[in-house]
Amino acid sequence: MRLQLIALKKYFITGLLIWVPLAITVWVLTAIIRAMDQSLLLLPQSLQPERVFGLYVPGVGTLLTLLVIFLTGLVTANIVGQRLLRFWEGVLARIPVVKSIYYSVKQVSDTLFSGSGEAFRKVLLVRYPHPEAWAVAFQTGNPAWDIADMLPDEYVGIFIPTAPSPVNGFFFFVKRKDVIELDMSVDDALKYIVSMGVVTPPMKNPLGRAQNQ
């Protein structure tokens, strides 16, 4: 009887290991698609899929969103588009509250999505939350000049994400000599943090190629 219970428990856990990641993946993708499908509200009601087909068709709004993003990049890549963009930003600059929010978000997005800069390009190991503990962090850049002038040594800005939600975390300035730069990609580091250390990054051989553990 005991052996049968152990076998049943083993089979149940094996089933969980298969279905839990799949269910979470489907749930996240469904949430993303439903959020992007809200772009259909911009269309006239007569052109919305629910009116045309008589039912909700998931993913149509996602395609519309991706198309709008692509066309926006295509239009703003030329001189006329750049002038329109500057005009639009000039309008936003005249709205006090909107100006602060828009330009703050724009600076962050320009830093993250541009190929230049050091933001979130390096994975670091730092001592946190006490001197005897270590945490995985991302380098965000160097301190602003007015902050750097007040610091006695060379510091770097770091972001320590929380697990299992890496969108939240803590921002600190730490001494550059006290951080350890890891030979780990940002994607592998995020997987490591989200899984709370369960999904370990692949080992690398001396030539730098990843090896499966």
Image (tube, rainbow, N blue to C red):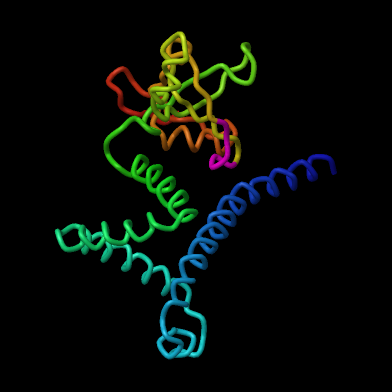
- Quarter of the picture holding the N terminus: top right
Work out whether 210 lies above or below 181.
Answer: below
Position in image of residue 108 (x %, y %):
40, 42
* Picture residue at 20% right of the left edge, 62% below the top: 81
Q: Nearer the viewer, residue 17 or 44?
A: 44
Q: Is residue 134 part of the magenta span, yes or no?
A: no
Position in image of residue 212 (x %, y %):
41, 31
Quarter occupied by residue 138? top left
Position in image of residue 66 (x %, y %):
35, 65
Q: Nearer the viewer, residue 42 or 51?
A: 42
Quarter occupied by residue 42? bottom left
Q: In the rendered view, does 33 fall on the left or right side of 122? A: right
Q: In the rendered view, does 125 fall on the left or right side of 84? A: right
Magenta-tinted stretch: 165-170
Work out whether 200 lies above or below 54.
Answer: above
- Quarter of the picture holding the C terminus: top left
